[in-house]
Amino acid sequence: MVLKFPHFIHGGDYNPEQWLDRPDILARDIELMKEAHVNSVSVGIFAWSHLEPEEGVFQLDWLEEIIDRLYANGIYTVLATPSGARPLWMAHRYPEVLRMSRNLTRNRPGVRHNHCYTSPLYREKVRLIDTALAERFGHHPGVLVWHLSNELGGQCFCPLCQEAFRGWLKDRYGSLDALNKAWWTDFWSHRYSDWSEIEAPVPSGETSCHGLNLDWNRFVTHQTVDFARWERDTVKAAAPDLPVTTNHGESYESINYFKYKDVVDIVSWDSYPLWGRDPDEREIGQNTAFAHDVIRSIKRQPFMLMESAPSATNWQEVSRLRQPGIHMLASMQAVAHGACSVQYFQWRKSRGASEKFHGAVVDHYGGSDTRVFQEVKAVGERLEKLDALLDGCPRPKAAILYDWENGWAMNDAAGPRNLGMHYLETVMAHHKAFWKLGVSTDVIDMECGLDGYRLVVAPMAYLLRAGIADKLRRFCEDGGIVLGTYWTGIVDETDLCFLGGTPGDGLGQLFGLRSEEIDGLYDGQYNLLRPLDGFLPREEYRLTELCELCKCSTAQPLALYGRDFYEGMPALTRNAFGKGTAYYLAARGEQALLDDLTALLCREAGIEPDLDADLPDGVSAIRREGSVTAVFLQNYLPEEVTVSLRRPYRDFESGEEVGSQLTLKPFEVRILEER
Ligand code: GLA
Ligand code: ZN
C-alpha cells in the first residue's frame, strides 16, 4: 500500500477556490463531506491563478487553511499541481507556453490542457509553483498523494517540440543514415540529407512515411511522460516520501500509458462510461472492465479511480441520469478490478462556465436530501466496511496483449482493410470472452513480462517490439499457452516488413505455419470456420473482415474455411512448442467463436473462473486476492437474475451463508467469500 491512509478512499475533485467569497458554503462543504462519508478530496487542480495571481507572487495561505480544516475534520487531501491550465497573465506574457496545433498556428490563451510540454519557460514556471507547493504542503499530515497536472495528453507542433523531436531521433538512431534506412526514405525520394529537414507529420506536409508517423507518436508520449517526470522530480525534491500519481483519461490513441509505469507510484484514471445508452448495461460494463484491466496492468498493482461521475456528465452526447443502483454498480466494479478508491468529478457543481451542468455530489440546490447525494453516501458507507479487502487485487493467470504502438502502426498502414482493421475492438472482443466466463485477465503491452501467466492471447500483433516474439516463444516453451491471430508479425519495430515470411521474428516456428496472403472483406461479406472432429461446440462460425491464407509446417489444422476459393484451408491451428501449445486463429471470428475458444483454452491452461458458478450473460465475477479473498458478483441487467453456485460461499458483508441459488436484484453487487 503506497498511501498512508489504510482505507478505501472516497471523495472527489474539490474546487474551493471558486467559493472563497462564500465561507458559508466552504463550511457547509465540510459538513456535507462528513455526511457523505467522504474521506479525501482532490484540491488545487486548475487553481494556478489563485496560487500565483501575479508572476512570482505565491499565495498559498488560503490553500493551507482549506487543507488544515479538511484534515481537522478527518478528510485527507489529494494535492494537485496546477499545471493543467495556466493563468492568463502567463499565456499573454509568454506565448511559447501555448500549444501549436497541427495546422502550425499558435493557440490563443484560454481553455486548458493546451500547453507545450517542451517549453523550457513553461517547465520553469511549473517547477517554481510545484516547489512552492511541495515545500509548504509536502510534509503535511493531511496530504495523501500528489496528483500531477490533469489528464496529460494531446500534441504540440511548435518549433521547440520539433527541435526536441529531432534531438530524440538523434538519440534513437545515432546517424541520419540509420534513420533513412529505418524509415525507408528512398521511397518517393524522401531521403533526409540533414537533421533540420525532419518535420513533424502534419496534413500540409509529410504524412506518407510510416516510420516518421510512428516515431512522432512515440516522441509525443515520451515528451508528455517526461513532463510528468519533471513534475514528479520537482515535488519529490522537496517531499521525497509523498507518493505520486497522474490521472489518465480513457483514451487508447494519443499517449501510451504503459510508459508511465516507472514514473508514478500509483496509477490512476478517470472513468466515464456511457451508462444508460443501451437497454441493459452489459456492453458498457464490459468496456469499462477492459479499461480498468488496462489501468491495473500498467503496474500490476491496485490503482485509484480518480474521477467518475456521481450522476450524468455534461459532455456525452446525451446526459442520461443514472438509474438507481448504477452508481453503486460502477463504484464496486472499480473496486472489484483493483481500485483502492472511488472518487468523483466533482464534489460541488460550479456556478458558471463550461461544466456548470456536470453531475456532482452536491448540486446547485446545495442540500444532502437528493437522490444522487444519498447514492454517493451509500457507496461511502459500503466502502468503510470493506477494509479487510484493501490489500487485495485481481491476480489473473491470463493476459491479453494490447500494445499502443502496435495500434498506431496498424491503423496508419494502408493495407488489407482501409475500412477499418478494428484492432482495439478485436482485443476487446477477446477480453469480453474472458469477462463472460468470469475469468480475470490482465491487459498488457509488449514491454511487460509474461511471468505468472498460463495463457497469453495476442491478437493482431502486427508490429513486434520489445522482444515480444522471444518472450512468447520462451513462454510457450516453458509450458504456456499462446493464442495468436491473423496479421501478426508483419513489421519490425521501425515498421519495416519482415522478409522471408510472416509471422516474422521466429513466430512462424512458434505457430508452425506461414501466412501467405490475407483477404480483406467488405462489410457484409463473410466466410465460415468449420471445426474439425467437433473441436469446438458449433458446426460453423462466421468470419468477417480479414481472412489469412496459411500453410502449415508443423501446425495441425483444427478448423477449416468453409467458403470462397480458400475453402478447406486452415482457419484455426494448433502447434506443440516446447512444453506448451500455440494456437493460431487465421481470421476475425464472431464473438461466439472467441467465447468457445477461450473457454477451451482456459480449461487446457487449468485456469478456473473466479467464481465456481454458471454465470448468466450480463453477470460478472471478479476475484480480489489479498489477506482476505473475495469475489465481486455484479448484475449488469435491469432485471433479477439467479446464479447457480457450485461451491458454498458466504456473503462477505453480512457473514451469512448463501445458498446454491443466489438471486441478484437489478444492478446488484454481492461480495462473496469462499467458505
Ligand atoms: C475530465 C477532467 C475533469 C472534468 C471531467 C468531466 O476527466 O479531468 O476536470 O472536466 O473530465 O467529466
Ligand atoms: Zn511545443
Image (spheres, helix red, strand yellow):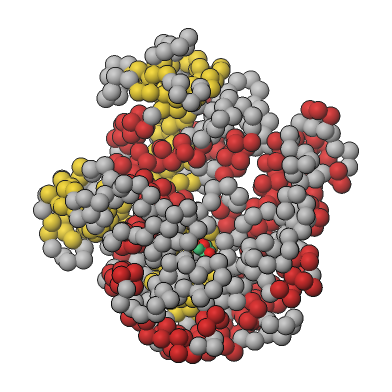
Seen in the image, is 167 located left or right of residue 138? right
Q: Position of residue 504 (x, y in %)?
A: 59, 27
Counting labels gives 0
Q: Residue at x 43, y 33 (%)?
A: 482
Q: Quadrant of the N terminus?
A: bottom left
Res. 410 in view: yes
Q: Residue furthest right?
A: 193
Res. 78 in view: no
Q: Quadrant of residue 53?
A: bottom right
Seen in the image, is 38 located left or right of residue 173? left
138 in relation to 284, above or below: below
Q: Residue at x 67, y 61 (%)?
A: 114
Q: Residue at x 47, y 44 (%)?
A: 450
Q: Position of residue 335 (x, y in %)?
A: 35, 61
Q: Position of residue 90 (x, y in %)?
A: 74, 73
Q: Quadrant of residue 40?
A: bottom left
31 in relation to 96, above or below: below
The answer to which of 5 and 30 lies nearer the viewer is 30
The answer to which of 493 and 369 lies nearer the viewer is 369
Q: Quadrant of residue 354?
A: bottom right
Q: Quadrant of the C terminus?
A: bottom left
Seen in the image, is 51 located left or right of residue 622? right
641 in relation to 560, above or below: below
Q: Residue at x 30, y 70 (%)?
A: 371
The answer to which of 358 and 657 lies nearer the viewer is 358
Q: Position of residue 576 (x, y in %)?
A: 41, 24
